[in-house]
Image (cartoon, rainbow, N blue to C red):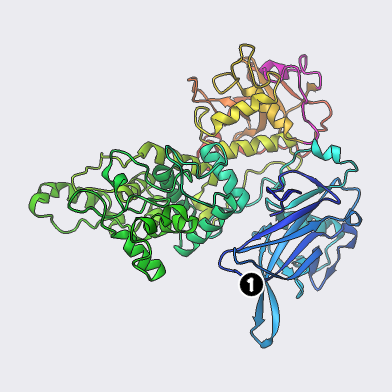
Amino acid sequence: MFSTEDGKDIQRTQTFYGKTHKLWVHTVNMQEEILKVDVFKEVPKEAMNEVNHIIYTHESKQSYNEEKVGKDGLLEVSFTAKEEWKTPPKNFDYYIAQVSRQLKDPTDETKKIWKAEKIQVTINDTLPADLVRTEDMEKLGIKAHKQDGTLFTQAEMLELRKQFIFYQQGCLKVSQLTTPEVIDNDVVPVTVEMAEAKKQKTCYCNRGFTDAEMEDLIKTMIGGVNIWQGIKERCDITDKTIKSLTAEMNAMFSHYEINRCMQKISFLANLAGETGFFRQSKEERSSYLSSQSVYKGRGILQITGEKDNTGYYNNAGPYEKYGKDRFGDPNKFIGENKADLISSNLHYAVDVGGWVFETKKAGTWNNPWTGSDAQYNSLRIEKHNHFSKGLGKNLIELGLLIEEEEEKYFWLQAKMLNGYPKSHKLTDNPHSWSIRKDALTKLKTWFKYDKRVCDGEAVLMPELAEGSAPWFKVAWKEYEKYKGLREIDSPLKEKVHEYFKVSSTGAKKQNGGLWDHADPWCGAFLAWCFDQTEDFKRINTAYSAQAFGWKSDKWGNGENSQPFVGALIVFDFSHVALIAGETKDGSGYVYLGGNQGNGEKRTGYQKIILGSVPKNSKTILEITKPKKYIVSEEDKKLPKYDVKAENSKESSR
């Protein structure tokens, strides 16, 4: 990750040639190893050529050779984008970092070689091409063959680079503009996502989170980035940085093989119910005897001791087993002071969560219960039959069953996590069940969960035309991000207020109250989408919060238009949206908008969603566009949608 100039935070906005930034490399289990860091920039198009079917696309502008990782696992170097590296007439350049590890050559022990460990790009692995590097790791290229055997033209090389390599969050976006003042007003996130919306989807299986992803995930779940603040009591965690949390979560998931998206989603959803999603690392004092015990709940999933004859949880039990299993020392966490390490040390607090998920198992409920428990044998049989696929499985394995039968096995996972007494029925929900369920829904939305993608099926994004209007691409990303959420659900509820801030209403009403999801927000949603683009900011300042404010007679910068992907469609029932395509049979327009219910009229239930309307409907007042936007032939090609299927929460995850 590149830092801000003062080195206190991640660089989130465009920067300027000549400015110096720190480059942070955060490692896990690589203390004092020798690394090589290269900062790459695209090869200018004039210099691209094909040799032996390899097109070199990026070259290192700055190499940091044989840098030693600190004992804390961190490596830091300084980087300055030099003026002579500019490549006019572009407005900005992207710089990406690659980290390589020094290894012995297996064919020659006296020789050292480099192995690339991490680079800030994502590769489109659906193309028949490979990413290659020179031996010194200082050039990146694409190895590919044309079907007809001829060499790639310059235009084809540029297109291949565009289609094959995508920049990840955290890269450095450096403006070529000539005054720093322009940069200060150009607050664009340091990220380049897959702009072509028809690319194959990817998921979070078998990979770690980036720091930026973890930060965004935390924002989505708790509305901010202040972690480990406690709920009612102070949290004991000493390292409260997202950077360290990201590294520890990645290491924990990797060690315990919590690899699939749904395994991670269910783990995090239970975490929300146990400790408030990185808010607390211990059981806060309450009327429960466990909270008043020596071995109370600690860590992100609350490892807890066993009851003694007083009813308190003062027998070490799991604490002793965790110390022995993970560190070969059963006494490592024995005694209250040592036990507190699990709630104060970030590594232990996170790692123990994975251990709990691995060691807690569902019952088999095979053998009849005897004695005073015999009265519950009918419940035992009921559990045995109901959870037949999950018998004896640990919580990680149950995460796989959640992919097939979500409600049933997520319920069992949560129940086993916080206790499933023999007397409990299938109707006795786990503690904080509603919190866990809500968290599961939010996490599936954030992950864009789609089991087909996790299974490796080639699932394509909706085929938007290449010339799609930039504001429409913004709107579609919001649709994907909040799909399935009602306006009363966080984080969409909070986001609606952000939409109003850039609209004609501003943030506050005349009476001092705030514009929010309880107010009609279809126009504000579009105003926000336009405001995220470079060329159409504040395109409608006078009436943008009003649906009818986007009609040509109200919108000074707008005009009537023919239908195209991104055109505004204004309805007589005071609603405005964007044309996304047409229905399967071609008889209707499919439109994307905020504050839509598709027949659902209740306040609080509106969403960002697709709708459809017959093309000859009298409810359509106008179709409009910004005057300065030139409609391309590609824009006019309306993709076909099955609205019901596309709006399904499962259709894009």
Which amino acid type corresponds to the residue marked 1 in the rendered image? Glu
From the viewer's side, name the closer residue of 390 and 304: 304
Left or right relative to 620: residue 360: left
Residue 594 or residue 72, whichever sits in front: 72
146, 299: nearer the viewer: 299
By secondary structure, the bulk of the magenta-drawn segment is best described as loop
Write the residue at 86% across / 63% down: 48
Is 200 above or below relative to 206? above
- On the image, the x and y values in percent for residue 627 come to 83, 25
The part of the chain drawn in magenta is: 534-557
Residue 262: within the magenta? no
Number of callouts in the render? 1
Does residue 650 appear in the picture of this structure?
no
Mark 1 residue element: loop
Image x and y of residue 641, in percent: 60, 37
540 drawn magenta: yes
- Given residues 370 and 553, the one toward you in this image is 370
Q: Is residue 104 above or below residue 648?
A: below
Q: Is residue 349 visible?
A: yes
Q: Residue furthest front?
A: 337
Q: Residue furthest top?
A: 511
Residue occupying the point 40% across, 46% down: 270
Where is residue 215 drawn, in percent x and y? Answer: 59, 46
Name the quadrant of the N terminus. Answer: bottom right
- Per the image, the residue denoted by label 1 is 33
Which picture quadrant has residue 515?
top right
From the top left corner, tell me how far across and down residue 96 is, in percent: 74, 57
Q: Mark 1 Cα within 10 Å, few/some/many (few <14, many 20+)?
A: some
Judge from the rendering whether residue 373 lies leftward or rightward of residue 49; answer left or right.
left
